[in-house]
Image (tube, rainbow, N blue to C red):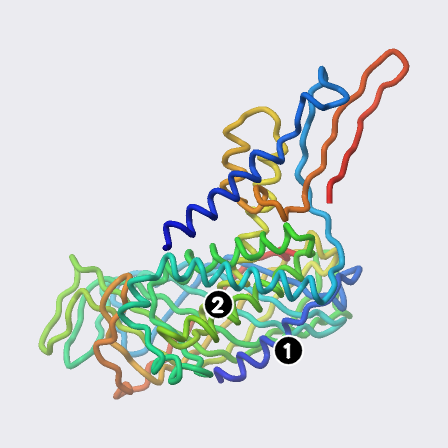
Amino acid sequence: MKNLFLILTILIMPIGQYAFGYVNVYALKMGVAYTYTRVTQIEITDSLPLGFGLSSHVGYKFTDWEINMSSYLNFSKLKAMNVEANNSTIRGDGNFQSVTFGPTFRYYYNSATTKRGTPYFLTGIHTVIQTMKFGVNTVQIDGGNFNQFHKLTFDGQGALVGFGLDRNEKKADNYFMELVYILNESRKTSEIAGETQVQLIRAERPKKRVFENTFFLSIGLTIF
Amino acid sequence: MRYFLLGLFLFFSAFKAWTIEPDSTTSTQPTKKVLKRYEYFDRGHTSNEIASHLTIAYAGMITGYVLTQTDTINKKGSWRNYGNNFGELTTDKDNPIWNLVGHPYTGSQTFLYFRALGYDRLSSLNLAFWTSALFETTIEIYTEPASIQDLYQTPILGSALGFVLERTSLFLLNNDNATIFKFVGHLMNPMTLFGFTEVETTIYPEISKNKQGLHLVVSF
């Protein structure tokens, strides 16, 4: 997966000259989002875990297809959660962050274009890194020897599907809206310490598989 | 040594900052107010130019790394690490502030460097990617393996940030009302201070009995 990331990035990167119009052209797009996240193995007993997201895409747009190297970044606050780590049970509030990197493919239904834009279908695969940081003042740790100042990280892979509407007119003032569902599975859990100099305390395969389900409602524009 | 390099760097940047100001004593229109405009002109480049610009950006990134990461290099760096990390690609556990602010800022300045040399935005993004990828895979592996976050976020988020800094700095620099605007403009986009910047346009008005108009001088 990581090598695929590098190969696709290198294939997409030899960017040539501008093309005129918004087909057969390279573009950089960015969007901001509301996110809704649920993570298995983390019980949330309080309010909806809504968060903030950021997406970025760089790639090439053909007439019907678009291939991008994309990243989805999700910051969520988790309230009253309950997590098992390092033989400890951690209860309290915290922050959850996940960031994905991978190729995405858009298919534009040009026949359904209206004056508001062209609908599209989106899919992709990615590698993901998730980080969980606990609120030192609110967290309660039962058993084990997990340090409240430490963070948990999860490495894994995932996929996404979604649909959206792209204005699909002049590239310079193009914008898009999309709803994406992201499913991630973590393969490795790590306990880390330190803010500037990060130190790995332990890494292990999780006893139970950890899945992250995120809905990503995004609005964005073509930067250039 | 690093303070010497930093001093040299500042000296040349300040030198250029002084010399690019229009000399009013030799102007043909000494009594008229000269408006200096900063703009970017995209042009084609030869392979030799691209190679040399890429090399300079790469060298700049290495210099910045040595100056800012001395402790990390001393503590974690080794040739054994270099051998082990060569060709490795991983996901790092660095602080999000570092990955989402530090690296994109570095990428934005690399993007603005290439913009200042006359590359269009997509080519600047492309070259920012190659500079960052070369640095990640051949230099930073002395202390840690190349990371996916750095490879992606440095050029991609960096170029988006660079685009915003470019537009904002040009707006401030081309605003003739306040020195503080120019100061902030140069601070946002320091590449406008350097000798290689290809962005200078001078416009000055001429109003006389028989002539009314603007002189446009474009410097490449």
What type is the residue that disc 1 sits on?
Leu
Q: Quadrant of residue B15?
A: top right
N-term-proximal mark, 2 vs 1: 1
Residue at the extreme left of the image, as rendered: A143
Which residue corresponds to mark 1? A11
Q: Of circles 2 and 1, which is in front? A: 1
Q: Where residue B20 sits in the image (x, y, percent)?
A: 62, 35
Tell me which residue sits at (81%, 16%) in the image.
B207
Closer-to-camera residue (B103/A85): B103
Is B152 left, or right, of B35 in this rendering?
Answer: left
Q: Name the residue carrying label 2.
A: A72
Chain under numbered label 2: A
Query: Label 2 vs label 1: CA separation?
Result: 20 Å
Identify the element where label 1 is drawn: helix
Q: Residues within 10 Å of mark 1 (few under 14, many from 20)?
A: few
Labelled disc at residue B205? none
* Above/below status of B82 relative to A92: below
Q: Is residue B105 left or right of residue A76?
A: right
Residue at 48%, 82% (x, y): give it: A2
Residue sitting at x 48%, y 42%: B11
Displayed quadrant of residue B32: top right
Label 2: element kind = strand
Where residue B172 appears, as percent x and y from the top left, is 58, 35
Which sits in the foreground, A165 or A136? A136
